[in-house]
Amino acid sequence: MQETKQITDKDIQTLVGNLLRTGVYISMGIVILGGIIYLFDHGREKIDYAVFDINKVSLKTVAAIFEEVVTFKGVAIVQFGLLMLIFTPIARVIMAVVSFFIEKDYLYVLIGLIVLSIIMISLSGGFAH
């Protein structure tokens, strides 16, 4: 019979550390790629920094960012990379909840779910709407 390997806290910490590191590297690569695309498309434009027109800002929602990423617009790709950077710690909280569930530590599962719900409420605009 084959022995099953028990998952230890060190294995979970290594997995979470690799998740955070990989998430940061991927988001950094996406932001750099978006910046290069943006510079190729708009590098020679003159910008008037004295005037700010809020109506020119098209990427106000996550859905708008995803719609523009498909067309390979540099600004949208940069913002998508920043979204990936924001969602990396959220993935870490999800991983912590899963690891606590595997360890059958249900109090910490509950605490992790509360933290995750607070993060999601704050990302969706909080109670200000």
Image: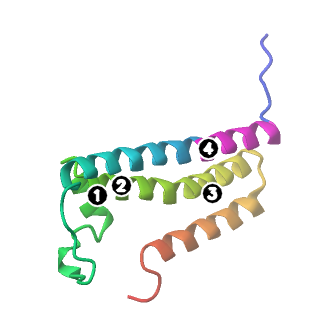
Q: Which residue is mark 2?
A: 78
| Cα distance in 3D space between marks 1 and 2 | 5 Å
| Quadrant hosting residue 105 | bottom right
Q: Which dot, 3 or 4, sits closer to the camera?
A: 4
Q: Looking at the figure, which quarter contains the N terminus?
A: top right
Q: CA distance from mark 1 to mark 4?
A: 24 Å
Q: What residue did someone put label 1 on?
A: 75
Residue 126 is inside the magenta segment? no
**Residues rendered magenta in the picture:** 8-21
Residue drawn at (77%, 50%) of the image? 104
Q: Would you say the residues marked 1 and 4 are in contact, meaning their CB atoms lie under 8 Å apart?
A: no
Are discs 3 and 1 less than 8 Å apart at CB? no
As measured in the structure, the alpha-carbon distance from the residue carrying label 3 to the one carrying label 1 is 28 Å
The residue furthest bottom is 128
Neighbour class for label 4 at 10 Å: few (<14), some, many (≥20)?
A: few
Horizontal relation, residue 61 to residue 45: left or right: right
Name the residue tied to disc 4. 21
Q: CA distance from mark 2 to mark 3?
A: 24 Å
What residue do we see at 28% from left, 56% from top? 76
Q: Which residue is mark 3?
A: 93
Residue 39 lies, in percent from the top left, at 27, 51
State which quarter of the image contains the C terminus: bottom left
Q: Amino acid at mark 1?
A: Val
Q: Main secondary structure of the magenta part?
A: helix
Residue 121 screen position, x and y as percent: 49, 75
Residue type, mark 3 in image: Val
- Looking at the picture, which amino acid does disc 4 mark? Arg
Quick one: SS at disc 2? helix
Between 57 and 94, the residue placed more toward the observer is 57
